[in-house]
Amino acid sequence: MEHFSQYLNSYVMKKASFILILMDSEGIILDANEFANSITGRALKGERFKNVLIDFPDTFKLEDYLHDEGKGFLLNIDTGGLPETYYFQFKTDGDKVIVIGEQDRMEIADLRKNMMNLNHELGNLSRELQKKNAELNKLNILKNRFLGMAAHDLRSPLAIIETYSDFLIDELPQGIEEEHKEFLDIIKTTSSFMRGLIENLLDVSMIEAGKLELDLVDSDSSQLIEKNVHLNRTIAKRKNIDITFSSAESIPRVSLDENKILQVMNNLISNAVKFSPSDTTVSVTVTADSENLTVSVADEGPGVPEAEREKMFSPFGRTSVRSTGGEKCTGLGLSIVRNIINAHGGEINITDGESKGSVFTFNIPFES
């Protein structure tokens, strides 16, 4: 019998899965089993029992719990993380108090059952979500295919309209009414905008389909960008905007898709011109360090609010900033630009200019 008592005492103190605490009448813990120490994450001997509890109203008084020795009291234990709730019984033994804390096994069983049901429902929802995602991906592929076909078929007739209207404007006979000239200008401007939109839609459909392919060549990037600046100066002159170009000496050659980078530059420079007032300057700068080619396009426009900058790089993303000459914007250009730069292994961002305006900066690594 003595051997059994020793075994029972050892089991309760070291292996039992309930809280057992012995404390004096003042609430000082004299001893605690391993489970109690494990749950709280510390040795409880010498602590006040009150400090083991999560007692927000600070109303715990030991004497209030000693009157009903058979009653279970719900109390929250401080575990160092999320609190755990136990049913506590308080029993007096002379000048000592024995505290036993247990969790309701039926509650635990119900909780496990509910958790299993929730996991089952979550699994069903996950499978349904995967099914819907597969359907959406299929629809997205069909959408991109249709968009590509429609845009391709529209591009040629729009290019013809733009070219012929441009020819008519150049060959206008003397004495034609000013209203008719205006009509031709509207036809040319609108067809040009629509052709640009079609080109952007084709690019977007290719990007979404994962078909953005780069034709990489070893390039003199500084010379490439300088020629592009020269071509864009003609457009900028219409608003009396000057485009300056500066490049650091000895820019290393870099592997890039020249046509795609020209597309990037055309977009950034045309945006800078579009959102800049007349009689200002757009500055294009090319620099390099040991790792990256860096190109920046700075304007003297109103700038872009910081909260709206990320939106600019989303498809059809619009900001509160408006063009200074009534130019139209598709909201696709910068999204395409970011994808092109990312495909080169680089990044693009926008910051404030030194005094006003915005600075768009992209980098392309020399080795990717």
Image: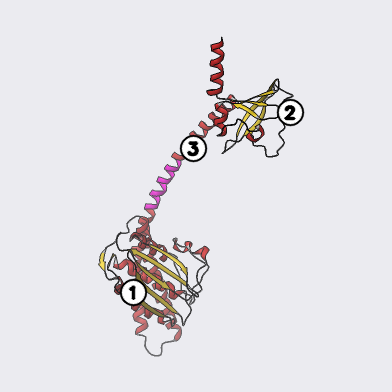
Around disc 1, counting alpha carbons within 10 Å, would you say few (fewer than 14), some (14 to 19), or many (20 or more)? few
Q: Residue at x 30, y 63 (%)?
A: 366
Residue 63 tag number: 2
* Residue 202 visible in the current orientation: no
Tag 1's secondary structure? loop
Q: Residues within 10 Å of mark 2 (few under 14, many from 20)?
A: few
User: Dividing the image into 4 quarters, which one contains the N terminus?
Assistant: top right
Pick whichever of labels 3 and 2 is earlier in the sequence: 2
Which structural element holds mark 2? helix
| Amino acid type, mark 1 | Ala
The answer to whether 1 is drawn above or below residue 246 in the figure is above
Quadrant housing residue 100: top right
The residue closer to the viewer here, 183 or 281, is 281
Q: Earlier in the sequence, mark 2 or mark 1?
A: 2
Residue marked by disc 1:
248
> Which residue type carries mark 2?
Glu
Direction bottom: furthest residue? 175
Q: Which marked residue is nearer to the observer: mark 2 or mark 1?
A: 2
- The quadrant of the rendering that contains the C terminus is bottom left
User: Could you say which quadrant of the image residue 21 lies in?
Assistant: top right
The numbered mark, 3 or 1, whose residue comes first in the sequence reads 3
The secondary structure that dominates the magenta segment is: helix
Q: Which of the 4 image quadrants contains residue 245?
A: bottom left
| Range of residues picked out in magenta | 128-141
C-alpha distance separating marks 3 and 1? 58 Å
Q: Which mark is residue 122?
A: 3
Q: Tell whether position 134 is magenta.
A: yes
Of residue 127 and residue 67, the one placed in the foreground of this image is 67
Q: Nearer the viewer, mark 3 or mark 2?
A: 2
| Label 3 – label 2 distance at C-alpha | 47 Å
Q: Position of residue 155 (x, y in %)?
A: 34, 67
